Image: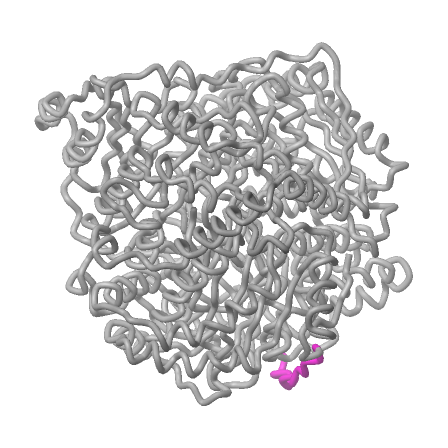
């Protein structure tokens, strides 16, 4: 369950987006998939982590693909540094201490790749295994992982993952997890359910806070209240809800509604069908997250038995990482583990391998499509291979991972390029090689395909793979891939993800199957060995046999064809209603009265606050533990030939990070929707001398990557927004000249004339936006509300919201008929942007490398046009201000309401950050999520524009959720806050402000503060206001957000039936918009 609380105007930490194609579920995660500017943010929305093959795991980061306005950004964790405790290893008496605490040392190894000493222990009494990794990283990580293979699709592992965090033996309140969200300095707090395991990780840079988190999590997994409290099972899993006997019965439950949302998304349905068809005979043949049609078959007895069976130390793998005392780790663990005897759970939880098929299989499934959609080109097809009947050896797995990057890793990769250039579909589906389960798989296909072309796609994939096996790969492609992978490994940039957690997930991918947990942490020798093989034997000899053996000659192939069905969503709803009608018909009057009583009893429990004595059981820090000063990022502001240059002297391990910023405000209004496609064109079209494949390979060979994207944000006190194009790149400092030469090349030399590639960009963008609309409707609603309330929001929505989707739908037709005019418009954008006037350069590296790079920056700036400053354009917003319902085929809703509270006269105070976070973690959590059944409910205060907004995620309700939003001011006025609760809220908010950041993120955050005019004096002032927040501030803020109730605009992304019901109850409440 990953929280996401952003105080971006203070920390200016930014948010990372990464692809999500897997069946991993989680309790909480980042809420906004659409770009928004720096906010105070409180949330409870869901995470989807994609499975990553070995190279992606080794490369440490959830690899981002920059999207408009949110590139390279990262969901920043929160941290306050403490003095590191000197690490001790097995050479200083730790062995004797471990023995006395009941642990046997199995192995100790130095892991040079992460500058760590790792010791594997076994708890003698229970057999629990512990990996203790010691180093000088202040961002400490703990995780406990259980193997949890389900036998059916009732979602037991997923529901249990939610439920164990709802109170425990030592912490007997409703949700200790939420209390940790409110008042901890954690840099990560979540839980993940995989198809065969469940992970509970936490992280913090504050040692006291870290051990508090560890204790809460250990007590939660081993001694949860949920195995004695049926109502927790009902709340998090499923239950029948009946408000009074005359009404209809409904299904409710957080996981139930989460999975209804998952099963409304075509890409998720495809992923689940593919996995279950590839592994029909083992645990991967069912859905660990839960199928909404099957979840209501789960009984409480089965739920309790699953916990008893698998949540036992004998079935646990435990991970510690960081600069804390390794002996203290074992002391904490022994206090829990010694309470148990050994069990057979480790043997009972073993995952059996899937036997290979003797011939291929074909499956046809339907997915819910919109009635307004043109269904001719809405089919999907994906080819999936199970690569082996057992785990691959390390050398083969590494080589196949490298091959996967060669074939699919970049836009220039041959398999990816040829499939997309065929014009047979709009966008690629399938993640290539995935190896986080027991047996690896390879998947590839297309969506946006016409039914007549399904077999052509299959033939093209097979023939391209055959040609790659016959011809091999050119040397430039191999060199580019090798440099990209090695750069990523050495940079070890995990973004906001704690490095120790990245290592844990890497290690557990083998450890969970009783393999060597050290092996995945070591990449240096295997990489050098692979390079030597390629040099000696040639790339073709290394890679072609893998394509032939594991793909072309492998009969274990499953082809999944997905057909659009405009009636599926309504049929599923009707089927659910019929099931519930039968349930009600089978009940007596006494049964119905009892169900109504039980419904009220559950709701009362959910909405009743925990008693003060229970709240005090959760450990927390004091305000004395909190630094009074904000985290300082060094900045030197200078200029080179009249261009502002910002330099941040930080240790970056010899990597240079740089951003070149161009002012976008001279751009004509009608060109704004073209900007994201312009950015993509710069990176994915060729020059006069290099085709786009050669250019892409050159970037891969010489740098760590370059991205181009728009950034738009409101500026407090101004009507006009801050609006820029940012070119962002990184390279080893010795390649600084190459980096700036390549930046210049993509900006000035790329020819914006390739009609067919541009048509691909339009198709891909349209497919991506349609997918976002179904899976991240809350982000779409948020962007639409912003567009109705301020110019910055309107600009952003033109480049990433419903307006952008409508633009793409029209542009798709125009590309064929009027390409010359589009190409001219792209050139006009370039001409408007590219000028030294208004340009700004940002650099992050150590002082020596900053100094050495200055001459290359000067050369780059000299090459830019020195055209006179273009007159700034005054953009005018045109989005209708009324309430709007965006109707899509879905079983859940995304409900938003917002207003500008500055217009009421409210003056920004740092207390607003504390109050916003508190609203999200109490009122909205309890009413929208816990009792309302939505997967997430949160609020967002954009301190730059003054827009305060509410949003829900995978919500079974619509008007009921709006009633909760409207009750917020009353909730604040009636609030009775004790000192402990207020202190926790302040500490939790500081944790958000002091987001833990790696050096590149620090430099980028400083850049954003500079662009938005946020001074160090203001940061200090806001911090002091946060630390001095009082109960009176809560009461006064109630008056400000009353404006959202009275004057707020509503946008919902919702199902046709729920919108129709809302407009029947409140005539003409919504203007209805169909976009699919």
1066 relative to 676, above or below: below
| Scheme of colours in the image | one colour
Q: Main secondary structure of the magenta part?
A: loop
Q: Residue 38: x and y, percent?
A: 46, 68
Left or right of 604, for residue 261: right
User: Is 878 inside the magenta-drawn segment?
Assistant: yes
Outermost residue on the bottom side: it is: 905
Left or right of 699, for residue 910: left
Left or right of 7, for residue 217: left
User: Is 12 inside the magenta-drawn segment?
Assistant: no
270 relative to 609, above or below: above
Residue at horizontal 24%, vertical 26%?
119
Q: Which quadrant of the structure image shows residue 1067? A: bottom right
Pick the residue in front: 266 or 734.
Answer: 266
Q: Residue 357: x and y, percent?
A: 68, 13
Pick the residue in front: 246 or 83.
Answer: 246
- Residue bounds of the magenta highlight: 867-879
| Image quadrant where one finds the C terminus | bottom right
Left or right of 373, for residue 469: left
The reply to whether residue 91 is visible in this rendering is: no
Q: Residue 1065: x and y, percent?
A: 69, 69
Residue at horizontal 51%, vertical 67%?
964
């Amino acid at each position: 369950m990953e929280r996401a609380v952003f105080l971006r105007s203070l920390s200016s930490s930014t948010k990372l987006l990464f692809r999500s194609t897997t069946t991993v579920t989680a309790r909480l995660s980042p809420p906004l998939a659409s770009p928004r500017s720096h906010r105070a943010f409180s949330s409870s929305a869901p995470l989807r982590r994609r499975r990553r093959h070995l190279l992606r795991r080794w490369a440490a980061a959830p690899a981002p693909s920059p999207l408009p306005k949110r590139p390279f950004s990262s969901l920043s964790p929160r941290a306050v540094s403490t003095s590191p405790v000197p690490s001790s290893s097995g050479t200083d008496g730790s062995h004797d201490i471990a023995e006395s605490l009941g642990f046997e040392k199995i192995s100790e190894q130095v892991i040079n790749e992460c500058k760590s000493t790792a010791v594997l222990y076994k708890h003698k009494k229970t057999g629990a295994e512990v990996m203790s990794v010691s180093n000088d990283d202040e961002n400490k990580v703990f995780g406990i992982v259980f193997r949890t293979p389900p036998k059916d699709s009732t979602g037991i592992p997923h529901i249990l993952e939610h439920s164990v965090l709802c109170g425990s033996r030592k912490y007997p309140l409703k949700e200790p997890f939420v209390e940790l969200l409110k008042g901890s300095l954690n840099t990560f707090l979540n839980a993940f359910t995989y198809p065969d395991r469940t992970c509970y990780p936490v992280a913090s840079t504050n040692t006291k806070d870290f051990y508090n988190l560890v204790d809460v999590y250990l007590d939660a997994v081993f001694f949860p209240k949920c195995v004695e409290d049926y109502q927790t099972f009902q709340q998090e899993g499923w239950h029948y809800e009946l408000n009074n006997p005359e009404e209809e019965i409904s299904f409710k439950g957080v996981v139930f509604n989460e999975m209804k949302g998952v099963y409304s998304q075509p890409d998720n349905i495809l992923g689940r069908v593919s996995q279950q068809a590839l592994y029909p005979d083992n645990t991967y043949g069912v859905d660990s997250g839960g199928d909404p049609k099957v979840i209501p078959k789960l009984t409480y007895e089965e739920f309790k038995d699953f916990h008893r069976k698998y949540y036992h130390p004998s079935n646990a793998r435990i991970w510690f990482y960081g600069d804390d005392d390794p002996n203290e780790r074992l002391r904490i663990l022994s206090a829990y583990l010694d309470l148990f005897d050994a069990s057979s759970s480790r043997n009972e939880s073993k995952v059996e391998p899937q036997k290979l098929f003797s011939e291929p299989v074909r499956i046809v499934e339907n997915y819910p499509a919109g009635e307004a959609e043109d269904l001719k080109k809405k089919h999907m097809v994906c080819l999936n291979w199970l690569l082996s009947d057992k785990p691959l050896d390390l050398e083969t797995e590494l080589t196949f991972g490298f091959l996967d990057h060669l074939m699919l890793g970049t836009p220039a990769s041959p398999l990816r390029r040829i499939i997309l250039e065929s014009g047979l579909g709009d966008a690629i589906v399938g993640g290539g090689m995935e190896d986080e389960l027991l047996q690896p798989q390879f998947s590839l296909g297309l969506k946006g395909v016409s039914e007549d072309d399904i077999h052509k796609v299959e033939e093209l994939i097979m023939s391209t793979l055959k040609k790659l096996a016959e011809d091999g790969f050119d040397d430039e492609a191999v060199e580019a891939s090798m440099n990209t992978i090695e750069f990523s490994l050495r940079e070890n940039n995990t973004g906001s993800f704690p490095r120790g957690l990245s290592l844990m997930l890497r290690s557990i991918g083998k450890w969970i199957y009783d393999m060597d947990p050290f092996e995945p942490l070591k990449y240096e020798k295997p990489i050098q060995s692979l390079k030597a093989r390629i040099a000696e034997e040639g790339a073709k000899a290394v890679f072609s046999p893998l394509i032939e053996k594991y793909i072309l000659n492998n009969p274990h192939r499953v082809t999944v064809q997905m057909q659009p069905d405009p009636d599926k969503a309504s049929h599923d709803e009707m089927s659910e209603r019929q099931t519930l009608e039968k349930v009600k018909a089978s009940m007596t009057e006494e049964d119905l009265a009892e169900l109504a009583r039980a419904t009220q009893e559950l709701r009362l429990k959910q909405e009743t606050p925990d008693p003060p004595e229970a709240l005090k059981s959760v450990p927390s820090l004091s305000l004395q533990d909190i630094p009074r000063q904000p985290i300082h990022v060094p900045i030197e502001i200078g200029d080179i030939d009249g261009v502002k240059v910002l330099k941040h002297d930080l240790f970056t391990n010899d990597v240079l990070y740089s951003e070149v910023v161009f002012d976008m405000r001279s751009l004509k209004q009608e060109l704004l929707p073209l900007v994201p496609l312009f950015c993509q064109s710069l990176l994915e079209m060729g020059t006069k001398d290099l085709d786009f494949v050669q250019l892409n390979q050159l970037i891969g060979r010489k740098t760590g990557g370059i991205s181009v994207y728009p950034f738009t944000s409101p500026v407090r006190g101004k009507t006009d927004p801050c609006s820029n194009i940012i070119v962002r790149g990184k390279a080893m400092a010795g390649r600084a000249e190459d980096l700036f030469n390549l930046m210049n090349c993509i900006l000035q030399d790329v020819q914006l004339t390739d009609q067919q590639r541009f048509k691909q960009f339009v198709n891909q963008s349209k497919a991506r936006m349609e997918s976002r609309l179904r899976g991240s409707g809350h982000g779409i609603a948020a962007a639409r509300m912003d567009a109705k309330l301020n110019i910055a929001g309107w600009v952003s929505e033109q480049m990433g919201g419903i307006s952008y989707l409508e633009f793409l739908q029209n542009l798709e037709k125009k590309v064929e008929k009027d390409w010359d005019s589009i190409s001219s418009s792209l050139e006009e954008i370039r001409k408007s942007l590219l000028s030294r006037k208004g340009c700004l350069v940002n650099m992050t590296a150590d002082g020596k490398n900053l100094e050495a790079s200055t001459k290359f920056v000067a050369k780059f700036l000299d090459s830019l046009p020195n055209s006179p400053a273009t007159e700034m354009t005054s953009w005018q917003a045109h989005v209708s201000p009324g309430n709007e319902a965006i109707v899509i085929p879905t079983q859940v809703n995304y409900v938003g309401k917002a207003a500008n509270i500055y217009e009421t006269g409210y003056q920004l105070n740092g207390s607003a950050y504390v109050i916003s976070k508190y609203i999200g973690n109490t009122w909205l959590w309890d009413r929208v999520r816990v009792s309302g059944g939505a997967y997430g409910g949160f609020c967002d205060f954009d301190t730059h524009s003054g827009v305060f907004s509410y949003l829900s995620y995978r919500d079974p309700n619509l008007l009921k959720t709006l009633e909760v939003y409207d009750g917020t001011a009353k909730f604040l006025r009636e609030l009775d806050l004790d000192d402990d609760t207020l202190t926790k809220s302040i500490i939790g908010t500081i944790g958000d402000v002091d987001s833990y950041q790696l050096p590149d993120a620090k430099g980028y955050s400083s850049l954003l503060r500079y662009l938005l005019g946020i001074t160090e004096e203001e940061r200090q002032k806001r911090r002091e206001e946060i630390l001095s927040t009082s109960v009176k501030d809560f009461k006064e803020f109630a008056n400000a957000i009353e404006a959202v109730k009275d004057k707020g605009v509503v946008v919902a992304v919702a199902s046709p039936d729920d919108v129709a019901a809302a407009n029947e109850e409140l005539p003409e409440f919504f203007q209805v918009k169909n976009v699919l």
